[in-house]
Image (tube, grey):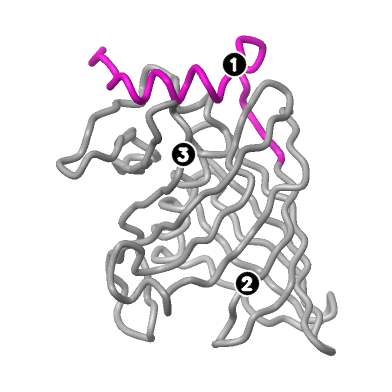
Amino acid sequence: MHPRPPAVERYLDRHVAPQAAQAEVVEVDMEGRIKLKARWYDFRSTLRVGALQSFRWDARVHGGALRFSGHDQYLAGKGEMDWRAYGLVPVVHEDSPDVTHSARGRAALEQVFLPAALARPQVLWSETADGWARASWVLDGEEVEVDLRLDPDGTITAVRAQRWSDAEGRPWRHLPFGGTCEGEVEGDGLVVPARFTVGWFYGTARWPEGRFFEGEVTGLRVR
């Protein structure tokens, strides 16, 4: 096994207590704002992350008179989005190969909420040319990579990846995705970012327009 960079060892020591080292699933309660077609809406949600392999995000979104709910997920090698207005009227249902490819990248990014998984031997760590810590592993036959910006003490301040997208109505392609992290929350032996802002074009001049999600963790449970 390749040795981990020292910053990664500090990150794992800080974020994973011994009793949580074998955690397989974490549930994270969140609330915040999400931008849809240039308008911001409030949300409450629960994110469920499976170690190195899956996620499901169930949310209720509201703004003015509009109410809708649904989920995004990557499970058993397949991605899906399913959303309904007022719990009844279908708004979005997609499960194409492109959606699966994009969701697989998100499943990799969501592992920051289950840091115990990132300590597993199948995760290879390296340092990028610009000083980020990079985690890579094979997920359903595809190599995935997630970069973490770590403070000297191992605290996450940012996360990034190249993610499959059809943003702006253009053909599907890889685009910069990521965002910033602030503070920490502890639960059941795991420490994760407390607040985060994420979106497309992270690290570029277009980041201000690409931001679409601002969240805060309100609960954290290992299952």
- Looking at the rendering, the stretch of residues picked out in magenta corresponds to 1-27
Image-based side of 43 in relation to 165, left or right: right
What residue did someone put label 2 on?
Answer: 34
Please report contact status of discs 1 and 2: CB closer than 8 Å, yes or no: no
Write down the quadrant of residue 203 in the picture: bottom left
99 or 135, which lies in front? 135
Label 1 and label 3: CA atoms lie apart by: 21 Å
Residue furthest out toward the front: 152
Please tell me in which quadrant of the rendered image residue 208 appears. Answer: bottom left
Q: Check disc 1 and report the residue beneath it.
A: 22
Q: Amino acid at mark 1?
A: Gln
Say whether residue 82 is left or right of residue 98.
right
Q: Residue at x 30, y 66 (%)?
A: 175
Look at the picture and state if 123 lies above or below 180.
above
201 part of magenta stretch: no
Q: Residue at x 29, y 79 (%)?
A: 171
Q: Would you say 171 lies left or right of 67 here?
A: left
